[in-house]
Amino acid sequence: RKEVEQDPGPFNVPEGATVAFNCTYSNSASQSFFWYRQDCRKEPKLLMSVYSSGNEDGRFTAQLNRASQYISLLIRDSKLSDSATYLCVAPNQAGTALIFGKGTTLSVSS
Amino acid sequence: DGGITQSPKYLFRKEGQNVTLSCEQNLNHDAMYWYRQDPGQGLRLIYYSQIVNDFQKGDIAEGYSVSREKKESFPLTVTSAQKNPTAFYLCASSITVFGEQFFGPGTRLTVL
């Protein structure tokens, strides 16, 4: 299993749709998880942290499933401005640093 | 106004030349990182530093060197030994090595 793996997409959805991304990780002892958003040719920006109890921020919900070793990001009522690449972050197998997934591309159309 | 600065935004160099990319932060973060991103690809870790005067290799350290003489600064040198240096280079910092990372705007390096 890769250390952090995401479905690259692209996910093409209409405005108002609900879309979910999953990200699997290999280090079963992982404690720190994050979701970042990256716009084309820009730096990644923190979207939200992922806690054991889940985390919700407006239209965005992040959840952790330790048994199956994946984290998820749910976006409700998609907006055109949500179009971006979403990167998940988790510790590497050695537990020495965080590593980024390759990202999932979302395209929201009107 | 706290943040991370990288300079320059665009950099052009001739093949065979060493080049140093600047990264400065005033967030008082202990940990700093350098990543490389190629078109359509994810971020790959080059080097990271948990504290001053200490740094560790990431997944793709060959052909790169760093220093961490000050808490605020973590410059990256791309040496002539790096086979394909043209890429987008991102610097980040965090309070601890497993904390939320905050990124600078990046430097686009093109080697001609």
Image (tube, grey):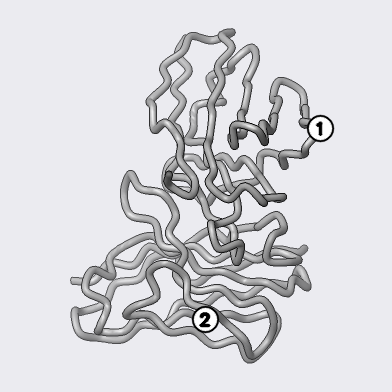
* Residue nearer the viewer, B109 or A88: A88
Which amino acid type is marked by label 1?
Ser
| SS for callout 1 | loop
| Residue A101 position (above or below residue B73) | above
On the image, the x and y values in percent for residue A35 come to 62, 40
Circle 2: residue type: Pro
Residue ID at (45%, 40%) = A5
Q: Vertical placement of A28 versus B17: above or below?
A: above
Q: Residues within 10 Å of mark 1 (few under 14, many from 20)?
A: few
For discs 2 and 1, the disc positioned in front in the rendered view: 1
The numbered mark at residue A53 is: 1
Which chain hosts label 2? B
- Residue A71, quarter of picture: top right
- The residue at 43%/44% (across/down) is A1
Image height of A53 relative to B88, above or below:
above
Same-chain check, marks 2 and 1: no
Label 2, on which residue? B75
Q: Nearer the viewer, residue A92 or A16?
A: A92
Image quadrant occupied by the N terminus of chain B: bottom right
Report in which chain the residue with disc 1 lies.
A
